[in-house]
Image: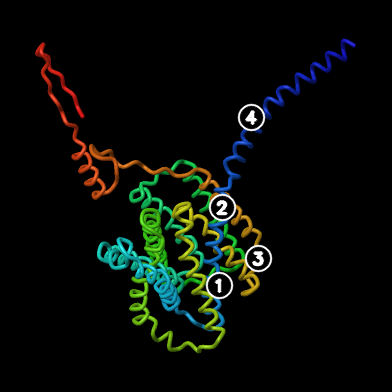
Amino acid sequence: MEAAGAGAEAEAGAEAPQEAAAAPRRRLLALLGAKLCTWHILKTVLLGQMLSLFICGTAVTSQYLAEQYQVNTPMLQSFINYVLLLLVYTTILAFRTGDDSLLKILKQRWWKYLFLGLADVEANYTIVKAYQYTNLTSVQLLDCFGIPVLMALSWFILRARYRLIHFIAVAVCLLGVGTMVGADILAGRQDSEGSDVVIGDVLVLLGASLYAISNVSEEYIVKNLSRVEFLGMVGLFGTIISGLQLAIVEHRDIMRIQWNWKIALLFAAFALCMFGLYSFMPVVIKVTSATSVNLGILTADLYSLFFGLFLFYYKFSGLYILSFVIIMVGFILYCSTPTQTAEPAAMPQPRSTGLDNAGLKLEENDNQTPVVTVQFTRDESVVVSTD
């Protein structure tokens, strides 16, 4: 009996350290689950993948036009999108009155939107143009250059402050992109070397930087002004700039198009996908950030690949699934911890933002200057009171 009791005590003593060692792991898993499995992260992931599907639609229709009908008119396709934005959102601004009216906005900051429209139009054009000079692998890799540029611009312009986990998450996403490029090489999807790889690579870097400028500007305008103002102004100036560029560089390509209902349908599908992307992206950026959105849409190439398996008979590789998982893990890690905004330098007076608000606050302070009353008592003591 004593031996049996001693054996039971020994077993209990052995189980106690195991339970003690397992407790921290359970707490860690519970903490990760509570941090990662939230409605905000789920909503962010779903919204980001909706944007990826819009981008996938534009990529598939463009490739179908190029491969099946030899139609390469990226500026014409962008022009149609800007016209749709003009007809919808610029028209809304035209019917507004007050400070949000079209004329008021143009009077105050037309030149800013001119540069924004130029950056947005040329970003779309240079990326597509780069495919004529370099290969798919270079475009996929160098296009990621826009993410560090975007983070740097957000740091200085939007005063975003990142933590270590954000940099780790970006590195994980870029690892997923590298895995996707490796899968393309193994599957034989990489294109032959272009006519001038250096020019193509420079165009990709330029396009990625212009996209970063456009996205940071979009985040600032959406969060401080309005979504309709951003889309209306981009539609207005984008239509003007892309229309002029279209007349200069693509008029001959347009004349060679053999129009039929299939080509028209592909143009319409592209325009609707692009219009949906432009209309929906400000909503997602307002909920998250421009950097988060750009990380989420890294999966767009993978969706295009999955459609290409049926439309263009691509070869499948298990690395594509792995790259999708890696990108999503990095994206969720980035969204798990919100970035912080650095507070502006403290001013002596007042704490509200903007010169106009500061002036109003100073006037309020002047109007509220306390009245000092001095009274003398019989004992010749001075009594000071304020109202």
- Foreground tag (1 vs 3): 1
Q: Residue at x 51, y 64 (%)?
A: 137
Of callouts 3 and 2, which one flags the residue occurring earlier in the amino acid sequence?
Answer: 2
Mark carried by residue 60: 1
Residue 336 in percent (x, y) is at 53, 44
Q: Which residue is mark 3?
A: 316
Marks 3 and 4, how far apart at CA: 41 Å
Of callouts 1 and 3, which one flags the residue occurring earlier in the amino acid sequence?
Answer: 1
Of callouts 4 and 2, which one flags the residue occurring earlier in the amino acid sequence?
Answer: 4
Mark carried by residue 43: 2
Q: Residue at x 58, y 50 (%)?
A: 42
Q: Secondary structure at mark 3?
A: loop
Q: Residue at x 27, y 49 (%)?
A: 354
Marks 3 and 2, how far apart at CA: 29 Å
* The quarter of the displayed image where residue 146 is located: bottom left
Query: Which residue type carries mark 3?
Result: Phe
